[in-house]
Each structure stands twice: as C-alpha cells, then as structure tokens.
Amino acid sequence: MHPATSPTAGVPAGRDHRTPLTRRRLVRGLAAVALAVPLALGAAGCGDDDAGGDGPVKLSVFWWGGEARAKLTEDALALYTKKHPDVTFEKTWQANQGYFDKLATLTAGGNPPDLFQIDDNYLAEYAGRSTTLDLGSYRDSGKLDVSKFPKSLLEYGVVDGKLAGVAAGENTQGLVYNKTLLTKNGLPEPTTGMSWEEHIAWAEQVAKKTKVPGTQDPSADYKALWVWLRQQGKDLYNGKELGFTAEDVTKWFELWKGARDRGATPTPDVIHEGNATDITKQLVVTGKAATSWVWANQMPDLKKNTKDELGVIAYPGDPSAQWARASMYWSVFKGSKHKDVAVDVINFLNNDPEAVALLGTDRGLPSNMDLRAKVSETTTDPAMKQSIQVESELAQKFGPSPQVPIKGHSKVKSELTKAAENAQYGRATPAQAAEQFVTACKAAIA
C-alpha cells in the first residue's frame, strides 16, 4: 500500500484461482484506456440491470491486498450471499503493485469489474473518464446509507459534484512518537495543537537529551505538506491546478532545513530511509528518530516492529486542517448491468453489523461511526483500540475535506520526494528545489 491504504495492501498475494486473467487482458496496457473506455461503457451498458430480483446475479469484484484481506473480504461477501442467495461473486484480488495497471487493462479490454476498490490517487482520473457510477442518487434515496459517516469522509469521495466512491474505511494523518523513550528520559510528550515551530523545538530538546533525533524530517511527505498548506489557507490542489506556489514550498523546505541545522532531525541518509513507505523502515520503530509521520491506522503494524510503547497525535498546527480521509474506496463501474446490486453490496459492507465486525479495521477504521465504536469495544489489539480512540477524538476537530486529488497525483508525490531530498542533501537550495518541484508538478497534471 501507500500509507494512504492499509497495512496489508503491499503484501504479495495471488488471485482467486477461480478467476484467472487471460493473456489477452494482460497484454493490453494503460495506453489503451482513454480510447477503449467509451466502447467498454457502451458495450456493458446494453443489458438490463438484474438488481430487481428477477434472477440470479453474478457480480465481479476486484480489490488489492494480501491473503488476510482476501480472506476477510471473501467471508463478508459469502455473508452477503447467505442473506441474498440469488447473488454470487466472481472475485479477483492481487497485491497493490500492478493493481491499477490491471484495472486499466480490464477496463480497456471491455471486461471491467462491476465493483472495484480504488484510492485517491486514481479516483478523480477514473471519474473524469466516466468510468465510475455517480452514487449520489443512491445516497439521496437512502439505498446507500451514509448517515453515520463523518461528513468530510463522505465529501472526500465527490469528484466534480458526483459521488464517485464510498469510503471502505477511514484514516487520517498521525504523528507517532516513542513514548517509552520520552518517559525514560523525563521528557514531555508532544501534544495535538502544538505549532510546527514548537514541534521542532521539542524535537531539538529530545535530540539533545537522548541523542536520538526528535523527529523524522517530513519535507518529502506529501501528507505533511498538505496539512501545512491548509493551515496557511492554501491547498494541494485548486480545481485542475496546483493550490500552492514555489514560494510556499520554499518556506516549507526552509522550515525543515532549519530543523536539520538544529539537529532536530536525522542526517539526510537516515531521512532517506524514513521516506520509504515500508512500515518496518519507519524511524520511530528502527530507533533512528523519536517520531514518524504516518497514517493513524498504521499504529498496530508499527507496534509489531518495536517493543517500545508508542503514542499518536495529530500533525502540528491547527488540527482542523486534517480531515476524515478515505483509506480507499469502493466504486461501481458505470456500465455495469448490476449497478443496484453493486451499490447494495457497498451498503452492506459498510453498514451490516456482522460484515463490519468481520472486516474489522483491515481497510481502515469503519466508516459507520456507530459500528466503529462496537469494533473498538470488541478489539483485543491495544494499538488498534488506541488508533480508533485517537481518530474518534480528532473527528471532533476535523475540518472540511479537500477535493479529491487530480490526475497526476502519484507523480506529484514522487516529485516532492525528489525535490525534498535534493534540498536535504544540499544538491539544491530550498528555493531551487521548490522551483524544480513546481515545474515538475505542472507537467505531471497537464
């Protein structure tokens, strides 16, 4: 996964053996998508919707994840079939790597899944191609019950006024810190609401006392930049354009150059290690920094990699700059002959107590706040209980969601890492690195 998803998203895994992909599908690439999607839509949209109970329905479902997620998802879908005997599923799943290439291939090849998992890197892109069904009418009619969702979690699935996806789970940015290290050295814990300058000063104090840098340098982390921009009255995107300037990014890079100069962060080589998305390489668990900038729902997996007690708070600054983010979405193919059934499955996975209990927190915290509370009561994982508690507390402080990232977002994230590391290693000044970043971003979203 990228951190935006779930702990199992990047685990190598196979497909359901019952749904092998043909060679014809595999050889078609992303380049064919733009031309082929209209044809696929037309072909798939010719039949009648079988959702009215007039006969058996076989719904194709595609998602990414590891074997644990596959088992949970298959169990939940089997529960749906038990309660709706006329509906069965053709299930396909694989690891995160290559998932979106395959989704594009299936879509371009005229054989898209009825129901598929997607994330905020691609939701706007697929919605812009009219690949995703607008779920707004189902929401308005109550057939898709989102009444128990945090408002900003629902809003984060809207693209150009249309509800393109429904959150399969909630996540938000989390600053995870080594509580054991701080307690042992008589140091205060960081708190939600401290300013960025206060956080860096705290990290400097930690470094001097413990000889462990107080914080990972997050200048390459788009999550941190995004929250910081929102606190400055800006945003990552504004419509189809960037929501920031090179001057904004220069200030961001200068903030962290100052932190590095004060010894509050590790050296560039160690910062580079922490820029990896692999949970096992996060500096808070490798002992190379007292804090890491992650997603709050990663707490349980982080805890598995250290014997120390961990704490988690919001990112520095005004916490209303954070929002209830969809860890990933369920979307329905616009041309599906079984749209109503596919939407009902989404409703079931989010709102059926048995299904939500089965799925747990694999895709993030349950979107339904009432059922999230029940999962919190029954979970035996203290780290997950802590994660749910923190996000529930933060939910009271969340602000409105930003727009869903636009096409090219993945490239924007990778270009930020490249530019930030140029500044970290001294290959460019903060201003030069910021100019390089903005230029590359404009090309990526063009």
Image (cartoon, rainbow, N blue to C red):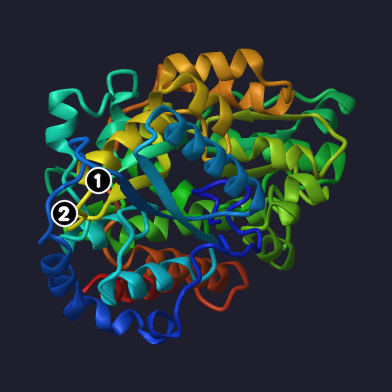
Q: Which residue is drawn at 49% across and 65% down?
A: 19
Q: Which residue is drawn at 56% across and 52% down?
A: 218
Pinpoint residue 442: horizontal percent, then vertical percent.
Answer: 26, 72
Q: Quadrant of the C terminus?
A: bottom left
Mark yes or no: residue 192 visible: no
Amino acid at the residue labelled 2: Gly
Pinpoint residue 318: horizontal percent, then vertical percent.
Answer: 41, 28
Q: Name the residue under label 1.
A: 403
Q: Name the residue under label 2.
A: 239
Mark yes or no: residue 328 visible: yes
SS for callout 1: loop
Pinpoint residue 103: horizontal percent, then vertical percent.
Answer: 38, 67
Left or right of 107 in this view: 22: right
Sequence-wise first label, 1 or 2 = 2
Using the image, determine if residue 242 lies above or below residue 68.
below
Pinpoint residue 219: horizontal percent, then vertical percent.
Answer: 52, 56
Measure how far apart labels 1 and 2 are at the Cα level.
Answer: 8 Å
Q: Which mark is residue 426?
A: none
Residue extending furthest toward the front: 55
Q: Residue 152 versus residue 336: which sits nearer the camera?
A: 336
Tell me whether the residue at label 1 lies in contact with that at label 2, contact meaning CB atoms closer than 8 angstroms: yes
Amino acid at the residue labelled 1: Gln
SS for callout 2: loop
